[in-house]
Structures are given as structure tokens and as C-alpha cells.
């Protein structure tokens, strides 16, 4: 799985919070109210930003189990200043960590879990891994909230015809084969939606776009550099034009003249 720097995760946290599909929260609350004990597993937790956003929007005493393969990120997530402070109704929140490969989770591992949650994770899975995870969640009877999965749609303003070249190459990079794993990339939400529906669960999806403007220039510049870089890694023949394109876009960003909408989707699954 891809390793992310804590600095990048901190930089994007506010944009993530603004983008999350809040219309999916009430069905989650309704499901959790019927649980004797609320246990939430955050898969690929990073620095714990999803928990900081979600815990205070859900009622009841919560036990969060943070999963990640990166021990450094788990240390960040468990730090006192990183933990969610309290639930919606002021109830206490307990936070523990588990260093493990989340693609190995099975139904027995999820026993007693109320909600499986993740942020910006699905596009890093393969179809087989997604199917196994979905089967484990449905068999365990827990709800699922997967947020901020890339959809492959980017709109920059002002537009430029080279945007399409970069976007297509980036999406191909997201679908690449790495270490023998064929990543789902921007197809992830479609695949996950279909798998959960076939398993008989109730599934909803909602748009959760980043909308970046002059007030988020640092994030826009970092995202833009990575976006173009991944496109060039996928299609090296783009490099000569991409270098000039990136410098032009970064200059626009620094001048507060660039707006970007990077589309994501959130997925909610509730057991039948």
C-alpha cells in the first residue's frame, strides 16, 4: 500500500472535512443508536483525521480501533492532540491502534464492530481485495462508510486543453499494476457499490468534491505537482509539455488565479 507523509495528510485535512458528504451521517447515526456498544474501525487511518471529523458527529460512547501498516502514522494518530475529543452528545471516546494489513481482515476480525470506516482508501485496493473486504463487512453485520475515493474527474478554471491529457494519464496511473496488484483507482466506488449490492446490503453514494481556490493555494500546489508527476510517470512522453504546463499552473496558483474541483465519492453501506 502507498505510504503517505504526515505533512501531506495534515495539509489536506481541512479540504477533506469540507468535502465529506454529510447527508450520509443520519443513516449512520440511526444504525449506531441500535448498537449496545459502538465500535468503529478506521482502516488506513493515517494521522486519524477521519476520526477527528466523524467522532464528534456521532452519538454515544465510542471505541475507535485505528488500523494502518505504517507505525509512524499510528503514533501520530494516537498522540493526545490528534485524538477526537468527544462524541456528539459529550460521551467519552476511547482510541486504540492496530498495526496490520487491512487487506487481510476477515469477518472474524470484525466481530463486534459497529462501523467500518475509511478515507481515501478504496482506489488503492484491487478488485479481489475489495470483494474480500466487502464480504467480511457484510458477514460481520457492520455498517460501512468509505469516504473521499477518487472518481477520476478534475475540473480546473481557467481550463486548458492539456488538462485532459494530464487527467487521462493520471487516471491510467491510478489503475496501474504495482507489485503484482492491479489497483482499482477511479473505478473503485463503482466496483464497491456493485459488490455490496450483490451481497444484499443497502448502498448509497454521494459526491464529496474538493473545491480549492485562492485560500488553499498550498494544498492546490502540492496536489497539482503530484497530479502532473503521476501523469508523467505513466506517460513519459508528456514530460516536455508537462514541465511548462506545471510551472504555468503553479504561477496561477501562487497568484490566486487557479480554482480546482477534484471529484471524490463517499459510499455508505448498511446491513439489510
Image (cartoon, rainbow, N blue to C red):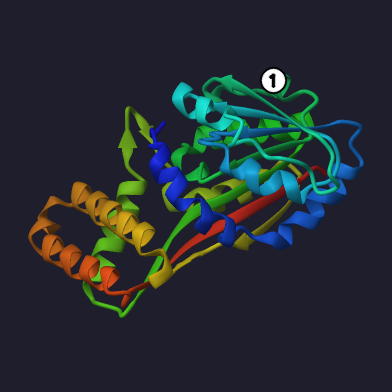
Q: Is residue 237 above or below residue 9?
A: below
**Any part of residue 114 in sight:** yes
Element under disc 1: helix
Which residue of the protein is positioned furthest toward the bottom in this rendering? 158
Total marks shown come to 1
Q: Is residue 230 left or right of residue 171?
A: left
Q: Which residue position is annotated with label 1?
A: 109
Q: Please give the name of the residue rendered at 38% of the width and 57% of the height, measured from the top-left corner.
A: 219
Res. 237 image quadrant: bottom left
Res. 260 image quadrant: bottom left
Q: Is residue 139 left or right of residue 89?
A: left
Q: Is residue 117 above or below residue 209?
A: above
Q: Is residue 59 left or right of residue 136?
A: right
**Any part of residue 103 in sight:** no
Q: Please give the name of the residue rendered at 70% of the width and 42% of the height, measured from the top-left corner.
A: 144
**Image spot of residue 25 (x, y percent):** 75, 55
Q: Nearer the viewer, residue 79 or 157?
A: 79
Q: Quadrant of the C terminus?
A: top right
Q: Is residue 32 above or below residue 213?
A: above
Q: Is residue 56 above or below residue 263?
A: above
**Image spot of residue 207 (x, y percent):** 58, 64
Q: Nearer the viewer, residue 73 or 172?
A: 73
Q: Please give the name of the residue rendered at 32% of the width and 42% of the height, measured from the top-left corner.
A: 176
Q: Nearer the viewer, residue 107 or 98?
A: 98
Q: Please give the name of the residue rendered at 31% of the width and 62% of the height, measured from the top-left corner.
A: 167
Q: Quadrant of the N terminus?
A: top left
Q: Residues within 10 Å of mark 1 (few under 14, many from 20)?
A: few
Res. 139 image quadrant: top right
Amino acid at each position: 500500500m502507498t505510504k503517505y507523509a504526515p505533512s501531506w495528510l495534515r495539509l489536506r485535512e481541512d479540504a477533506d472535512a469540507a468535502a465529506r458528504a454529510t447527508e450520509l451521517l443520519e443513516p449512520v447515526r440511526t444504525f449506531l443508536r441500535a448498537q449496545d456498544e459502538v465500535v468503529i474501525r478506521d482502516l488506513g487511518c493515517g494521522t486519524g483525521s477521519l476520526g477527528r471529523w466523524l467522532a464528534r458527529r456521532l452519538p454515544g460512547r465510542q471505541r475507535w480501533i485505528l488500523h494502518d501498516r505504517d507505525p509512524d502514522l499510528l503514533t501520530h494518530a494516537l498522540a493526545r492532540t490528534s485524538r477526537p475529543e468527544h462524541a456528539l452528545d459529550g460521551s467519552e471516546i476511547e482510541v486504540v491502534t492496530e498495526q496490520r494489513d487491512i487487506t487481510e481482515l476477515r469477518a472474524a476480525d470484525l466481530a463486534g464492530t459497529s462501523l467500518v470506516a475509511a478515507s481515501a482508501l478504496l482506489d488503492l485496493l484491487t478488485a479481489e481485495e475489495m470483494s474480500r473486504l466487502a464480504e467480511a463487512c457484510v458477514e460481520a453485520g457492520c455498517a460501512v462508510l468509505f469516504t473521499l475515493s477518487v472518481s477520476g474527474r478534475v475540473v480546473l478554471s481557467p481550463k486548458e486543453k492539456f488538462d485532459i491529457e494530464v487527467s487521462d494519464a493520471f487516471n491510467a496511473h491510478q489503475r496501474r499494476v504495482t507489485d503484482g496488484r492491479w489497483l482499482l483507482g477511479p473505478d473503485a466506488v463503482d466496483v464497491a457499490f456493485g459488490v455490496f449490492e450483490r451481497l444484499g446490503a443497502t448502498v448509497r453514494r454521494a459526491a464529496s468534491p474538493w473545491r480549492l481556490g485562492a485560500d488553499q493555494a498550498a494544498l492546490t500546489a502540492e496536489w497539482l505537482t503530484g497530479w502532473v508527476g503521476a501523469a508523467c510517470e505513466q506517460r513519459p512522453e508528456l514530460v516536455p509539455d508537462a514541465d511548462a504546463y506545471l510551472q504555468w499552473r503553479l504561477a496561477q496558483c501562487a497568484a490566486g488565479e487557479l480554482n480546482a474541483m477534484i471529484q471524490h465519492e463517499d459510499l455508505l453501506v448498511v446491513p439489510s
